[in-house]
Every structure is written in C-alpha cells, then in structure tokens.
Image (cartoon, rainbow, N blue to C red):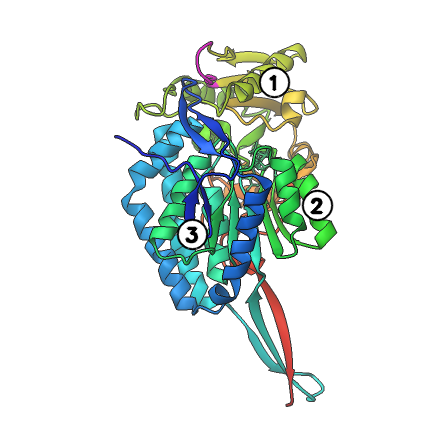
Amino acid sequence: MTVTYLNKLFIDGEWRDGNDGRTFPVFNPADGSTVAEFAVASEADCTEAVEAADRAFAAWAATSPRERSDILRRTFDILSNEKEKFAEIMVRENGKSWPDAIAEANYATEFFRWFSEEAVRIPGDFRLSPGGDKRIVVTRQPMGVSLLITPWNFPAAMATRKLAPALAAGCTTVLKPARETPLTAAYIVDALSRAGVPRGVVNLVTPVPTGPAVAKMMQHPAVRKMSFTGSTEVGRVLLHEAADTVVSTSMELGGNAPFLVLPGANIDEAVAGAMVAKMRNGGSACTAANRFYVHSSVHDEFVAKLAAELGRVQWGSGLNRANTLGSLVSLEERDKVAALVTTAVDEGATVILGGKATTAGAFYPPTMVTGVQHGDTINQTEIFGPVTAVVKVDSIDEMVDMANDTIYGLIGYVFGEEALALRVAMRIDAGMVGVNRGVLSDPAAPFGGTKQSGLGREGSSEGILEYLEEKYIGLAP
Ligand code: NAD
C-alpha cells in the first residue's frame, strides 16, 4: 500500500509549515528508516493555534448538538472506511504489530461514534429549591479552548478519546501529539477537517522542544482546559503549570497493573487473560499487566502454560501481518526494557523465556522472569514491554496488600472463581478492575485511575462532562 503522509501543522484551518521552517524526523522503529520529516511548531505557531481556537470558540459552542454530532459521525465513517491506511501509518511510525494497529484503529474510531451519540444527550437539571423561593436551573456549557496532549503508545486512541468529547461538548481544541507519532494525529485531524469541522475548531501543533511551548500555551488566558495522557512525571509538571492559571485538568497517567491469579482459578482462562493483558500493544500500554501475583498453589502450572503461549508468539515487523508482536517505539525504549530484565536477574530472578534484545531494530522478544520479589525494581517499574514478571505469593491477603502497595491505581486484573474474584476486585484500589478479563477498554466505559494514575475519566457518559462546566441560573419560582 502506498501511504502519503500529512506532515504539517494544522492551524486555523490551514496545513502549513512552522514559521521558522524547521522539521524533525519521524522514524520507523522496526528498521530505523525515516518515515517523514514533520514541521516543527515554534512557540509563535502554538500561540497562533490557541488564538485560532479562541476565535472559533463562540460560534462552535453555539452550534446545535446535532450539528456537532453529525460531524463526529461523519469522522467515524471516514476513518472506518480508511481503516487499513489508518493502521498502516501507526505501524510505520510506532512499530506496533498489524493486529494491534487494526485493533487501535477500530477502538480509536469508535470514540467518534460514541461521542456523536453523547453530543445530543448533555444533561441538565431543573427543580424548585427546598424553601420554594426559586427555581434552580442547571445547564452545562463548554469550558473553552482545550489543550490535548497525547503519548506515542496509542497514537490514535489517546487523541480521539479527547478530541471527540471535547468537540461534542462544544469546545475548540489544540492537539499536541507525541513527537514519535505525529503522522497518526495529522491523519485524524485531516479526517475531522474532511468531515466538516469549521476552521479553528481543531488545531495541531508539534513543538520541539515540547516543555517551554506547552508551558506558554498553558499561560494563555484563552486555554481553560488541559487533558493529558502520558507519564506521571510529566503529569506532575503540567499540574504545577495548570495551577498558575487555574486551568481545569484531566490526567490519564502511568500505571503498574497487578494481575492476581487466585487459588482455584481456571488456569487456561488466566493464561488467555494474561496474554491479552500483558501482550496487547506489545506491553506498551498503561493498562498492561505489570506485576503478576500468583498463588503458590497454582504458580507452577500458570508459569508453565503462560511460558508455552509466550514462546509461540510470532514477532517482527508490523508490515508482516502475521506477526502479533511488533517493535518497541525506539531503541531507547528497547534498552530500558533490556536493562530492567538485567536488573531483575541481578536481584535474584530467573529468566525462563527470552531475555535477549536483538541487535537490529527496536525489538525485544517475549520474555518471562520468575522468582521476582514484590520490592524488586522490575516489579516497581512500569515495564512498557513484552516482559512478564511473576511473584509467587502464599495468601490472598498478601496478594491484595502487594497489589495496593503502589502510588499507581489505574487498573488491576483478578482471575479466580467468580464470587471470590469479585470480592478481591472490590479490595483493589484502582479505577478499573478486570474480573476474569484481560482487556477492559471500551468507549462506553469510564476509563481512568485512582492515586497518581490520574484525575477524571475518559469515555462513557462521564468523558464529555470533563469538557463542560455547570452553570446555575436562579429564577423566580
Ligand atoms: P510522556 O509523559 O513522556 O509524554 C506524553 C506527552 O507529553 C507527549 O506528547 C510529550 O511530548 C509530552 N511532554 C513531554 N514533556 C512535556 C512537558 N514538559 N510539558 C508538556 N508536555 C510534555 O509519556 P510517553 O512516554 O509518550 O507515554 C508513556 C506514558 O504514558 C506511560 O507512563 C503510560 O502509562 C502513559 N499512558 C497512560 C495512559 C492512561 O490512559 N492512563 C494511556 C497511555 C499511556
């Protein structure tokens, strides 16, 4: 397939170069080749994008919900019809496998359908005050210009999970994708433009370096909302910046998901669940199972069966559609994963599968280490790669304590007899828990974390509320 790439900024309805003419390379991590040169947005370009969004805001906020809904629905149709092209861009700039790219294309596209349906159902309230002296009318209004900052690991879905509800709510937007994956973001912005989004309503900027340009946008008085998906470290920086201008924030941050296999669990089901929870997106997912706490009564069977499944995974370039594990996003990420495995061994763990990085491309093979202790580095770090680290535990109470002993609270997984697994799930401090399920993400469900995994929720009927402010109007009774 021949794919042409949009490699420019999108500001006030125009595709254009940055005003200082600089570009940065976008690499294919599977072979190191340059996929495209992308325009760098200067700080002045970023300010122009914010101001274009500001100028467009009043008219966009005043469109009917149905009009906004129709544009989102048309975007859904466009991306659905172009799924293969959409997926191929992700494979080339991110390195993910073809099945992961197609799955993401589907998931990402669904947010436009879901929020086209939510745009026309924004709730309000009308009631008499308890004292009978006034009518209380509560309406919801869009917050205003929304700055949307996304990571490289799900370059499409993390953008659509923000763009769709923001636009449905009547907000205008400036999207800042990760430097590694701007081409997917540009493709989505183009689909919105083709679907009829008015000029200025969606803008795309790619500043290099990122920090100062984003800080400047955050200082702009027109920016009233910032939604971020990325690491907890960068999230903390942005929360500090948001404080200066009291910008509303939604934060989808890092995770360190526990995966509990209880005594009496159906081990075949637990292994199937682990394959998805660990290996979806090659382990480069905030939802990826990171810490496997396996009860000693089922430990050996689980380890043997999971290792056998992992050993059958076919890995290599995402352009070969039969491969189910692609590359990591960069050589740096590959080396980070490799170093974690080396440290795990130094700390006493045993590699029973994989464990050797390739020399060419950012690949790392499916790997399993056992004999890990709860406090080991590999267990306390977001691995973000295809490495399964297993801790053997003797009691359910200990499993729960270990699962909750972290600053993160995004997601957890519990496998076991359903009533018991449900009781254990209730004790896991996380925004999401899968009971006998290895994947939870769904546009119709609230996605988000507790503790330092984030603030707010995306998707579901709650996702749109993140971009709306309540307004109370008091009337005579
Ligand atoms: P990252 O935090 O390094 O970068 C995320 C985005 O922030 C990128 O666009 C980056 O350019 C930008 N950025 C970096 N420094 C910045 C700064 N000083 N000011 C403003 N923006 C800045 O994260 P990443 O490496 O791209 O993605 C991986 C991380 O994202 C993992 O921790 C993962 O768990 C997390 N993540 C979370 C979710 C979720 O929904 N909770 C989903 C996907 C990924």
What kind of residue is marked 3? Gly
On the image, the x and y values in percent for residue 131 come to: 72, 86
State the separation of the CA atoms marked 1 and 2: 32 Å
Please give the name of the residue rendered at 42% of the width and 52% of the height, measured from the top-left corner: 13
Where residue 13 is drawn, which disc sits there? 3
From the image, tell me which residue sits under label 2: 241
Question: Mark 1 vs mark 2: which is more N-terminal?
Answer: 2
Please give the name of the residue rendered at 45% of the width and 32% of the height, measured from the top-left corner: 38
What stretch of residues is rendered in magenta? 359-366
> In the current view of this chain or complex, which residue is farthest to the front?
20
State the separation of the CA atoms marked 3 and 2: 28 Å
| Residue nearer the viewer, 364 or 390 | 364
| Vertical placement of residue 319 versus 443, above or below | above
State the separation of the CA atoms marked 3 and 1: 45 Å
Viewport quadrant of the C terminus: bottom right
Looking at the image, is mark 3 or mark 1 nearer the viewer? 3
Residue 89 part of the magenta-drawn span: no
On the image, the x and y values in percent for residue 85 come to: 31, 37
Viewport quadrant of the N terminus: top left
What kind of residue is marked 2? Glu
Q: Secondary structure at mark 3?
A: loop
Where residue 231 is drawn, which disc sits there? none
Question: Mark 3 vs mark 2: which is more N-terminal?
Answer: 3
Question: Mark 3 vs mark 1: which is more N-terminal?
Answer: 3
On the image, the x and y values in percent for residue 225 come to: 61, 54
From the image, tell me which residue sits under label 1: 340
Please give the name of the residue rendered at 47% of the width and 9% of the height, measured from the top-left corner: 359
Residue 176 placement, left or right of 218:
left
Residue 416 visible at all: no
Asked whether the residues under the numbered discs 1 and 2 touch, taking CB atoms below 8 Å apart as contact, a structural biologist would say: no
Q: Secondary structure at mark 1?
A: helix
